[in-house]
Image (cartoon, rainbow, N blue to C red):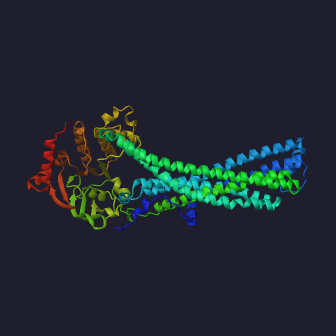
């Protein structure tokens, strides 16, 4: 078994260098929506142009042209001529025509801005939806060996938080385009009007950029601490609420509250520091902008007195100041988003590139429509971690229709046997045959359709009882599901529920008892009608009232099927055709219940211990 560095999935999201390769790879999911991206780009160019025209209409057309009669040649982009044409065409006064033109430009600016944002967001959401689906599909097909070593929460972060970070990145790129187009247009207009004043204002940009860079570095550290403490708060809250019964029984309310208060205080401290920095930075950028306006009024006023500038041009400069400074602020914001998104993208593609999987045969054998159910384990050896053997040359047979109980101390390899039989792990040392077919030559999809597994911790999915029996299998109709439920004695309690088979189940089926969930598990397996049945501790933790129903359901479920039972209950073991005893990954004994008791070996010892426990602690 190859050794992999699973610690890569434990890394937190941190800053990362700009990575063009990653962006190009991300474009694969955006490419199907390239036309809507193109439409968004055209709309943002139109919106940015209108954003520049609005102050030009006020300053050069109205103030200079109409109110002061200034006819000097200035880059008004034809707005003066358009105003006079509109006045001549409609009979409106030139001032009213200019106001109508301004209103139309304002409406068009708002409309194109809205359409730009909606087309951009729609394209990004669709592309990331496809990425999330591909990521989910990839992660869903990773083998059990992957999830044995990687926390599910870490995997979920890639599908949720990391994809969301990419959404912020792609949306932010569109925002930057919308900021920098008017920046360059306004800068060119200002340079054409007064180079000296423009250069004076540009001196503030390095100062604004330096402060923005310092602020973003300081806040990025704080924001990371805020997220970490908030995550700790949520985790602590979840643990306390999930274990509320234990908390109250042990009287830990005050201790747990004190711990929560400590984490909350730490989070509050980081939040307050980040708020102070945000407020300070906002005050600084506002001050720079207002100082710049003061410089324009001081310098421009002198130019107006000397007839070197018009009043409208001075007003235009004051309106363009925000177009000069605001992109620097937005760029600082997007830089942090960019670095976080780069790290998120690396984590997403790391997961997509994780090639660990169950190896499927190139030419899988085709199984007959119905299997007999003969199983043969030959010299089976297995280890999860190199150098730590779990199974040591296990060899035995299970005949068609036979029920075999597997017992043994904890860690003896009982569950490993059935995991290998279900092909949750690859194994090369030894062989398992199903009706003479080598399991490694059977596609896992075909194999698992023939094996029904009932675990002690029966998983309930969101949906109704019928949904949890059929599991989306179109071959399992309502009638077939009900017939299976009747056979395993589940129909009575299901019918007694408010909506019967259409009753929605709460999280993990908490509105059902343990016994009811177990009967539901039996109904699920019986409805699928597999040839091989595996019950891994499936009859544990059952109340006495339900035990007879469970035992009767087991008899019906195992009838005519090859069955493997990993169980501790005496009743279940005694009704098995044979019992296999494992110890330290090797077969210690195998035989009937009676013959193993007569041999007075490990099985007899385990039987005596269980019998004593049953006698000492009878079920109420």
Q: Which of 41 and 450 is in front in this view?
A: 41
Quadrant of the snapshot with the C terminus: top left
| x 40%, y 59%: residue | 142
In the image, taking residue 233 as reference, residue 434 lies left or right, namely left
Q: Which of 301 and 389 is in front in this view?
A: 301
Reply above or below: 599 against 99.
below
Q: Nearer the viewer, residue 161 or 223?
A: 223
Q: Can residue 88 be seen in this view?
A: yes
Reply above or below: 421 against 539.
below
| x 31%, y 62%: residue | 439
Q: Which of 339 and 33 is in front in this view?
A: 339
Quadrant of the snapshot with the N terminus: bottom left
Numbered disc total: 0
In the image, taking residue 290 as reference, residue 377 lies left or right, namely left
Quadrant of the rendered image containing residue 579: bottom left
Which x, y percent locates residue 572? 20, 46
Which x, y percent locates residue 570? 17, 46
Which x, y percent locates residue 476? 38, 44
Q: Can residue 178 be seen in this view?
A: no
């Amino acid at each position: 078994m190859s050794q992999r560095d699973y610690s890569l999935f434990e890394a937190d999201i941190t800053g990362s260098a700009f990575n063009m390769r990653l962006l190009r790879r991300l474009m694969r999911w955006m490419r199907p929506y390239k036309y809507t991206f193109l439409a968004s780009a055209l709309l943002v160019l139109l919106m940015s142009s209108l954003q520049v025209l609005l102050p030009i209409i006020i300053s050069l057309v109205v103030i200079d042209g109409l109110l002061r009669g200034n006819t000097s040649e200035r880059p008004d982009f034809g707005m003066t001529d358009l105003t006079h044409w509109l006045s001549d065409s409609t009979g409106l006064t030139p001032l009213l025509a200019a106001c109508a033109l301004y209103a139309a430009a304002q409406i068009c600016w708002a409309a194109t801005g809205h359409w730009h944002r909606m087309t951009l967001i729609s394209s990004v959401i669709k592309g990331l939806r496809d990425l999330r689906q591909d990521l989910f599909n990839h992660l869903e097909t990773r083998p059990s060996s992957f999830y044995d070593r990687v926390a599910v929460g870490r995997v979920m972060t890639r599908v949720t938080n990391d994809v969301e970070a990419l959404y912020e990145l792609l949306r932010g790129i569109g925002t930057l385009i919308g900021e920098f187009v008017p920046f360059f247009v306004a800068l060119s207009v200002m340079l054409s009007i007064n180079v000296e004043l423009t250069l004076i204002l540009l001196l503030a940009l390095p100062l604004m950029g330096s402060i923005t860079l310092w602020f973003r570095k300081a806040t990025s550290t704080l924001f990371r601490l805020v997220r970490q403490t908030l995550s700790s708060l949520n985790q602590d809250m979840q643990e306390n609420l999930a274990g509320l019964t234990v908390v109250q029984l042990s009287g830990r309310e005050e201790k747990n509250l004190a711990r929560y208060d400590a984490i909350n205080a730490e989070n509050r401290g980081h939040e307050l520091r980040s708020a102070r920095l945000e407020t300070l930075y906002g005050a600084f950028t506002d001050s720079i902008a207002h100082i710049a306006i003061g410089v324009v009024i001081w310098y421009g006023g002198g130019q107006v007195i000397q007839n070197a500038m018009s009043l409208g041009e001075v007003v235009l400069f004051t309106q363009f100041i925000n177009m000069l400074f605001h992109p620097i602020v937005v760029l600082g914001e997007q830089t942090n988003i960019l670095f976080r998104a780069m790290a998120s993208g690396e984590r997403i593609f790391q997961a997509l590139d994780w090639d660990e999987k169950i190896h499927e045969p190139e030419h899988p054998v085709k199984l007959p429509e119905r299997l007999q159910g003969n199983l043969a384990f030959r010299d089976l050896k297995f280890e999860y971690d190199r150098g730590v053997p779990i199974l040591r040359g296990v060899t035995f047979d299970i005949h068609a229709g036979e029920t075999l109980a597997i017992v043994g101390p904890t860690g003896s390899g009982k569950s490993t046997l059935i995991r290998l039989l279900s092909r949750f792990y690859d194994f090369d040392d030894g062989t398992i045959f199903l009706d003479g077919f080598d399991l490694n030559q059977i596609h896992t999809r075909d194999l698992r359709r023939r094996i029904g597994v009932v675990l002690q911790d029966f998983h309930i999915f969101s949906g109704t009882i019928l949904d949890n029996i059929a599991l989306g299998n179109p071959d399992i109709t309502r009638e077939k599901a009900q017939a299976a439920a009747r056979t395993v004695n589940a129909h009575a309690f299901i019918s007694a529920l408010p909506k019967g088979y259409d009753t929605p189940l709460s999280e993990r089926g908490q509105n059902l008892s343990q016994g009811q969930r177990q009967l539901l598990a039996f109904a699920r397996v019986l409805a699928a009608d597999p040839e091989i049945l595996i019950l891994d501790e499936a009859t544990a933790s059952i109340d006495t009232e339900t035990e007879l129903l469970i035992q009767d359901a087991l008899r019906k479920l195992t009838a005519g099927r090859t069955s493997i039972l990993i169980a501790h209950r005496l009743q279940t073991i005694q009704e098995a055709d044979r019992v296999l005893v494992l110890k330290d990954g090797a077969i210690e004994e195998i035989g009937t219940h009676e013959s193993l008791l007569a041999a007075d070996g490990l099985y007899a010892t385990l039987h005596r211990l269980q019998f004593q426990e049953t006698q000492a602690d009878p079920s109420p």
